[in-house]
Image (cartoon, rainbow, N blue to C red):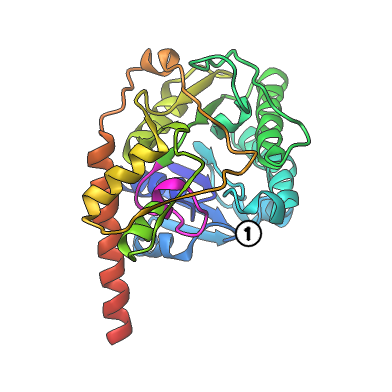
């Protein structure tokens, strides 16, 4: 089977590619490295069944480049991410989720591919019901600080729904809640990479506000299994939440990371950004009916992430010495 992954150099995209290559598939990956990492492609590029194309999904020439392949499946993940980029890359987020998503949907239509959109829990905004079901329309600010990503993903979902209704495309939507694990960007300031980096370097762990904000953190292997399941076994046109069903506070995450790293770092409470949401909790009934359940505990997942990070640091040191 030949599979297209957009955003392949990102945290999720690179892990999906690794899983699908392990199944024996041919994978074509597209990324422009605007927030993806070349490091994440090192292992993938050593596989002869992996083809990489450096491009933005908004570029029209990409369609001709991909015409040489026939894609049975498309995983569409391409979009700049990261809270620090909400202003800096706001136009790029909106362009990728609109023009870019339409371009990839047209390719899926022509190839008659099964299609998965990686959407986000950000479409729920600052929710006022718990847990959030897929029918919940959210509590969002269309022009707020987070709107380039929130509204961009909402628009992408609308495009997918239009292609399902109008063109009978076999497409599904996955609303991804907080995820962590190997290949995360250490520059985007998400809580897990930020805390691990600070703990290992002896810096204070910066906790916004009192650290009472609550999150559900899903390990990347569980996410990848769920995304593959949604694309292959989910119903066309349907939306599926995917995330952890175990809630924890930011302060609890900080203390657990200090324990796992044996770090002497202290916790430093800092001013909380006004756009930081207080909590989200996914309703998982729909994806549970497909047979999916999270398998990795937070402590085990963080331990695996820590081991992966240490291996990367050792590889970098060996490269510098040689």
Q: Is residue 16 left or right of residue 265?
A: right
Q: Is residue 272 above or below residue 187?
A: above
> Label 1 crowding class (10 Å Cα cut-off): few <14, some 14-19, many 20+?
some
Q: Nearer the viewer, residue 27 or 146?
A: 146
Q: Quadrant of residue 217?
A: top left
Q: Position of residue 26 (x, y in %)?
A: 41, 49
Q: Nearer the viewer, residue 32 or 141?
A: 141
Q: Is residue 36 visible?
A: yes
Identify the residue at image location x=38%, y=65%: 42
Which residue appears farthest toward the right when viewing the image?
143
Q: Is residue 37 above or below residue 148?
A: below
Residue 188 within the segment the image draws in magenta:
yes
Q: Quadrant of residue 308?
A: bottom left
Q: Is residue 322 visible?
A: no
Identify the residue at image location x=63%, y=56%: 65
What is the span of residues highlighted in magenta in the rendered image? Answer: 180-194
What secondary structure characterizes most of the magenta part?
loop
Q: Quadrant of the N terminus?
A: top left
Identify the residue at image location x=44%, y=27%: 242
């Amino acid at each position: 089977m030949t599979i297209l992954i957009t955003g392949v150099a990102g945290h999720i995209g690179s892990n999906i590619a690794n899983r699908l290559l392990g199944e024996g598939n041919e994978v074509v990956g597209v990324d422009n490295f605007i927030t993806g990492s070349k490091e994440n492609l090192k292992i993938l590029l050593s596989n002869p069944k992996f083809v990489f194309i450096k491009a933005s999904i908004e570029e029209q020439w990409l369609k001709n480049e991909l015409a040489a392949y026939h894609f049975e499946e498309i995983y569409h993940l391409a979009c700049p991410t990261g809270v620090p980029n909400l202003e800096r890359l706001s136009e790029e987020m909106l362009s990728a989720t609109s023009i870019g998503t339409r371009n990839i949907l047209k390719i899926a239509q022509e190839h008659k591919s099964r299609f998965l959109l990686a959407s986000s829990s950000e479409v729920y905004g600052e929710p006022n019901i718990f847990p959030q079901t897929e029918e919940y329309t959210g509590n969002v600010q269309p022009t707020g600080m987070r709107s380039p990503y929130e509204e961009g993903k909402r628009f992408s979902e609308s495009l997918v729904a239009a292609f399902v209704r109008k063109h009978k495309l076999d497409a599904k939507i996955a609303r991804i809640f907080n995820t962590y694990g190997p290949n995360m960007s250490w520059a985007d300031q998400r809580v897990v990479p930020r805390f691990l980096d600070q703990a290992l370097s002896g810096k204070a762990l910066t906790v916004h506000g009192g650290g009472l904000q609550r999150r559900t953190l899903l390990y990347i292997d569980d996410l990848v299994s769920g995304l593959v399941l949604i694309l292959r076994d989910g119903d066309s046109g349907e939306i599926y939440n995917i995330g952890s069903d175990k809630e924890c506070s930011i302060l609890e995450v900080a203390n657990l990371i200090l324990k796992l790293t044996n770090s002497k770092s202290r916790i430093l409470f800092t001013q909380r950004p006004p756009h930081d949401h207080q909590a989200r909790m996914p309703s998982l009934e729909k994806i549970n009916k497909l047979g999916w359940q999270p398998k990795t505990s937070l402590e085990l997942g963080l331990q695996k992430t820590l081991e992966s990070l240490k291996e990367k640091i050792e590889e970098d040191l060996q490269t510098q010495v040689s």
